[in-house]
Image: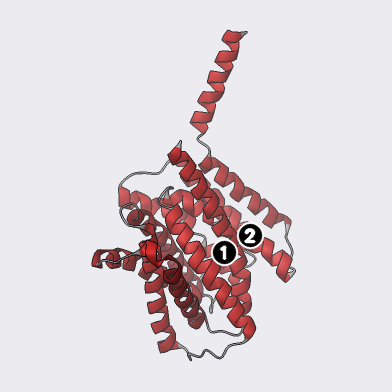
Amino acid sequence: MIENSKKNISDISLFFVAVVWGGGFVIIKDTLSTVTPMLLIALRFIIASVLMYMILHKKIGKISKNDIKKGGIVGIVLYLAFATQTYGLQFTTASKQGFLTAVYVAIVPFLYWILYKKRPDIKVFVGSFLTIIGIGLISLHGSLEINIGDSLTLICALFFAMHIISIEYFAKDMDVYKLAFIQIAVAAVFSTVSALLTEPFTLELTNRAWYSIIFLAVFSTFGCFTVQTIAQKYTSSSHASILMSLESVFAAIFGIILLNEVMTPLMIFGSGLIFIAILIIELDIKEVYKKKSKTTIDKKYVN
């Protein structure tokens, strides 16, 4: 019962992570008009790591070399995911990148298979396939021609899948608060170095830009990555990837509310497919069938 309760809380937490990340998509889209990509990533990770240590330093405690090694791996993968995604966006459309990035949903089960030598249930693959179709209907509005931006985005999808898998792998035997802090801090270091080497580094930004960066740092980075790291201790990587892919649905919803975008019938259908995919993965069909059969038999004997 306790394990099921923790799993349910984790699922609800990851659902809210998807909500925040969906809203963050609209904020990032607006902020990139005045802030260079790597600078935006660097500032959000710097602020998030400092804030996290200030608030959770007692829970984080002393950090060992082994902690840095494990958390560093997760942080480097996280940085690479954001870096390839950001640079790729310069050569492709946002809608196409949204679809291509979401390919991580289908990659995660295969990485899990490779790492643990254990094939996930068929329902995971079915759910992943339906999710990809759903996200495609929501996000894809152009051709499927592959250019350098698309190629970088596909690499980014691989890194996001690796990030989800790496969190699951290290969260089993490492304090989740240490893991969450180290990955964000490492990503901050690498993104800052990248920004200094590739872009004009300036802190003279508009108030609107700073408000957006602070929101991204506090909620989308500090809040979401901390929650994700803790939640993945109690749920599978494949499960987590499906739930977090709901960000595409909420990105569409917030786009309609805040950017006056239109929700087409295909987008509505795509959202429905994603929810169906989640139900397929969430529900144990065999157990439901057994309970239903048992109930039927019990009623038969009672009558």
Sequence-wise, the earlier of marks 1 and 2 is 1
Task: Tell me, for residue 250, which label it has, or none.
Answer: 2
**Residue at figure coordinates x 53%, y 38% from the top left:** 283
Q: Is residue 25 above or below residue 34?
A: above
Q: Is residue 197 shown to the viewer in this render?
A: yes
Q: Is residue 211 above or below residue 158?
A: below
Q: Which residue is mark 1?
A: 21
How many angstroms separate mark 1 from mark 2 (CA)? 8 Å
**Residue at figure coordinates x 36%, y 55% from the top left:** 171
Q: Residues within 10 Å of mark 1 (few under 14, many from 20)?
A: many
**Residue at figure coordinates x 62%, y 87% from the top left:** 206
Q: Amino acid at mark 1?
A: Trp
Q: Position of residue 144 (x, y in %)?
A: 56, 66
**Residue at figure coordinates x 53%, y 53% from the top left:** 13
Q: Position of residue 264 (x, y in %)?
A: 73, 59
Q: Amino acid at mark 2?
A: Phe
Q: Position of residue 93 (x, y in %)?
A: 59, 73
- Residue 256's quadrant in the figure? bottom right
